Image (cartoon, coloured by chain):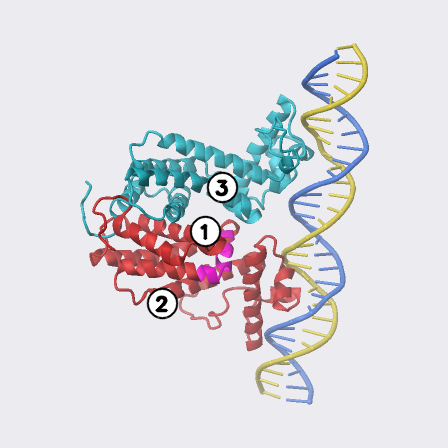
Chain colours: A red, B cyan, C yellow, D blue
Amino acid sequence: MTRTASLKTATPDPADDAAQAGPGAPKTARGARTRARILKAAEDTFGTLGYHRAGISDITRAAGVAQGTFYTYFAGKEEILRELVRDMGHQVRAHLAAEIVDAGDRLQAEEKGLRAFLQYLFEHPSLYRVLQEAQFVDESIYREYYEAFGRGYLRMLADATRKGEIRAGNNEVRVWALMGMSNFLGLRYALWDRDVSFDEIVATISDLFRNGLTLEGPEKNP
Amino acid sequence: MTRTASLKTATPDPADDAAQAGPGAPKTARGARTRARILKAAEDTFGTLGYHRAGISDITRAAGVAQGTFYTYFAGKEEILRELVRDMGHQVRAHLAAEIVDAGDRLQAEEKGLRAFLQYLFEHPSLYRVLQEAQFVDESIYREYYEAFGRGYLRMLADATRKGEIRAGNNEVRVWALMGMSNFLGLRYALWDRDVSFDEIVATISDLFRNGLTLEGPEKNP
DNA sequence: CGGAAAGGTGAATCAGTTGTCATATTGTTG
DNA sequence: CAACAATATGACAACTGATTCACCTTTCCG
């Protein structure tokens, strides 16, 4: 979003897919491969050591390249983090979107979405750490991530409201509440301790969505 | 938790209240004052610069003492962070507890609690940053914070269930969901942009608690 | 009052990192 | 295959920032 967009709006700019900015976008297949290896290595390294403890040397060692090679593709530590967050953001959103498409209604979509998110986080624990640490390295990347996520989410809630699947209300506030829930549930039950089954979690949250916390109008659903 | 606890279990160890561990707990009033000044300076410094960007020199400068003085009271940068998180944790919990005591039922307590939390975060923005960064410096402090918070919360939900104020369900999962909601709502609407009133937020969440997201049994409440 | 304990100082040390660069290797192209 | 461009290397210069320490000042108390 930062880049040349505002300057040369017309030029589609090839070699843009795999290479946002950076000192030199790879111009050969080998270069692209190396860049990708470094990016993956950074994900793993940041994921386990954390952004600050991880050194460039840790990343390049994990990638199997020399230190200097890093700077062929990335301007520095911050930039590779930005790249990483964008990348991972695309992946989660794509994954969740795919898991949700065949949901009958909004409630079902919420259930499927939550379960898929927990599962995804469990399988890609680096996502959490990289993202959360990015918040304090460059807040804008973090906001971008959640605002992008939130925009998509909001659109879906708006649709659901229109269809009469959910009651009218401030959907933007709801979106942030829902994202917060998923985040904490993921941290607690997917990353820290899997001592409660995802089914149980989804059932609990689903009940909240269907009936709230109060007793009134109880046992509407099995 | 690190300290002498396991060694001299019997000895109550005076001067323990204001001074967990540390190379030397202050033994005079002057020392206690200086220690407190440093702790407060750390809160401000970490809050604005962030844990990693903040240097010991930034803290001591803000506190108006020499660098060496820092090590009279704290073993290092990590330890002062731990201290800080414990401290701040006590404060929020105490504050929220006080704001909630006069609530008639659980739903009202949730409303009051959420509003108070948003307000508190707005007035003490450092809390968020210090806490979140602590997560990656020493995960145990972070877990401790939320587990302590969660225990209290859980007790209250259990009471409410017993009194029939809320429906039966997995209260532990609910607690994490609720903490996540507050956290994100606070970040978005108290720290980033106050573009939605706290009243509106509280009303939206309250509606979720009373009625869920679905349409069924609509307009139960005004 | 006088000596000891507590508190305070800040320059110096020291470990660890980033980013650079001169050089070597690999790939591409006419 | 010659010449050029793109990649890759890894030692190292330059820097940052945490912690130490020998010494000074203040406070406490018999």
Q: Are marks 1 and 2 in contact (CB under 8 Å)?
A: no
For label 3, the residue is: B145
Query: Where residue B103 appears, x then y in whole percent?
Result: 31, 32
Q: Which mark is residue B67?
A: none
Q: Secondary structure at mark 2?
A: helix
What label sits on residue A188 in the rendered view?
A: 1
What residue is pinned by disc 2? A98
Location of residue B74 with respect to B170 vertically, above or below = above
Q: CA distance from mark 3 to mark 1?
A: 13 Å
Q: Main secondary structure of the magenta part?
A: helix
Q: Is residue B13 left or right of residue B153?
A: right
The quarter holding residue A109 reads bottom left
**Chain label for disc 1:** A
Q: Residues within 10 Å of mark 3 (few under 14, many from 20)?
A: some
Give, as a three-letter code, the residue at label 3.
Tyr
**Chain under callout 3:** B
Q: Is residue B124 left or right of residue A101?
A: right
